[in-house]
Amino acid sequence: MANAPYGELFYTQKTITARNTNVGTNLNRTTLTKVPIVGNVDAGFDTDFYTADTGNNRIICKFNGRIQVKCDIFFEGDSQRASINLRVYVNGTPRNRRGGGGYGRNASGQDQSVSHIFDEFDVSVGDFVEIFGQREGGGGNIDMQFTESSIFNITKLLPND
């Protein structure tokens, strides 16, 4: 590996970014609900590394390696203090990290907020990654704010030689 200043590693990246098209699914449930985030996929992603499974709202990895997962869900709620907790699932199994964020106050015109999750882990060929959400705050409905307002990003980390 090439020498890097201050012992830092440099990485090249292979990234896929998906955005929501679904704005009508209530994500604020007491049971885990798959977030319908894989609607549109940004052009130019490397199909040698990923498959976007829009029907099942998941990204399938076609490699062995380490990835970073980032997801931002922009939402609006119809009741006070509505908020969701996000989790990354790999092959149908939850990871230990949980992501959250603000809540929709739903007073004085403020009914929008965002929840975030970030995770980094190893995957194998054929592993699929999904995002699930569950009620964290008040009741009522939480829907993604508008088409392509939320993103699901996976980046493969490749050490440079």
Image (cartoon, helix red, strand yellow):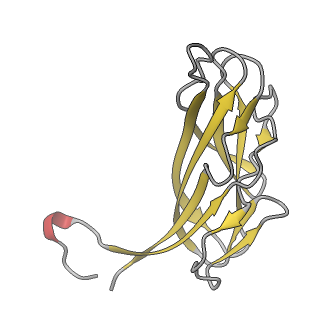
Residue at the far left in the pictured view: 5
Q: Residue 158 location, x and y as percent?
A: 43, 76
Q: Is residue 19 left or right of residue 29?
A: left
Quadrant in which the N terminus appears: bottom left
In-front residue for pair 106/54: 106
In-front residue for pair 9/57: 57
Q: Is residue 6 left or right of residue 84?
A: left
Q: Residue 42 location, x and y as percent?
A: 60, 70
Q: Residue at x 19, y 66 (%)?
A: 7
Decide: is 15 above or below 31.
below
Decide: is 135 above or below 151.
above
* The image quarter in which residue 20 lies: bottom right
Total numbered badges shown on the rendered structure: 0
Q: Residue 117 location, x and y as percent?
A: 55, 44
Decide: is 108 above or below 45.
above
* The image quarter in which residue 84 lies: top right
Q: Is residue 52 left or right of residue 104?
A: right
Q: Residue at x 56, y 63 (%)?
A: 154
In-front residue for pair 82/50: 82
* The image quarter in which residue 99 lies: top right
Q: Residue 135 location, x and y as percent?
A: 72, 26
Quadrant in which the C terminus appears: bottom left
Residue at the far right in the pictured view: 55
In-front residue for pair 116/156: 116
Q: Residue at x 63, y 85 (%)?
A: 48
